């Protein structure tokens, strides 16, 4: 699976797009002033960092959920094996 592009979560894309779009629109109106340009630069940087943090949080949560499901599946498999063994023993006693 390595090397394949994974689809981007539409919620993540929408949040990132809204942040960047809003900051870009506000910035376009005030680019004539040096202070405003610096503020816009900082706003873009902050938006980028927040978006990246959000994406990392979503990835981390998904990985945690994946691990939880894998553990539950392993437990269910072990339980099923134990029950199958119990049934086998009952059938061989008859």
Image (cartoon, rainbow, N blue to C red):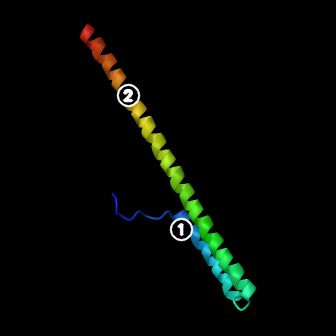
Q: Earlier in the sequence, mark 1 or mark 2?
A: 1
Answer few, some or many: residues within 10 Å of disc 1's Cα (few below 14, many 20 plus, some between 14 and 19).
few
In the displayed structure, 74 sits above or below 89; it is below
The residue singled out by tag 1 in the image is 13
Image spot of residue 88 (x, y percent): 28, 17
Q: Is residue 58 above or below residue 28?
A: above
Q: Residue at x 34, y 59 (%)?
A: 2
Secondary element at image label 2:
helix
**On the picture, is 34 further left or further right than 56?**
right
Total numbered labels placed on residues in the image = 2
Quadrant (top left, top right, bottom left, bottom right) of the C terminus: top left
Residue 56 in the image: x percent, y percent?
A: 54, 58
Q: Residue furthest bottom?
A: 32
Q: How far apart are labels 1 and 2 at the CA level?
A: 40 Å
In terms of secondary structure, where does tag 1 sit?
A: helix
Q: Quadrant of the N terminus?
A: bottom left
> Image quadrant of residue 33?
bottom right
Q: Is residue 43 left or right of residue 60?
A: right
The x and y percentages for residue 32 are 71, 92
What percent of the width, then of the height, locates residue 58? 54, 56
Crowding near the residue tagged with mark 2, few <14, some 14–19, many ≥20 C-alpha atoms within 10 Å = few
In the picture of the structure, the residue carrying the numbered disc 2 is 78
Outermost residue, top side: 94
């Amino acid at each position: 699976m390595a090397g394949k592009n994974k689809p981007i979560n539409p919620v993540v894309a929408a949040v990132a797009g809204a942040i960047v779009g809003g900051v870009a629109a506000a910035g376009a109106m005030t680019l004539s002033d040096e202070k405003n340009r610096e503020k816009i630069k900082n706003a873009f940087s902050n938006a980028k960092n927040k978006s990246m943090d959000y994406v990392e949080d979503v990835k981390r949560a998904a990985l945690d959920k994946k691990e939880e499901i894998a553990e539950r599946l392993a437990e269910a498999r072990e339980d099923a094996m134990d029950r199958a063994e119990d049934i086998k023993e009952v059938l061989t006693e008859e």
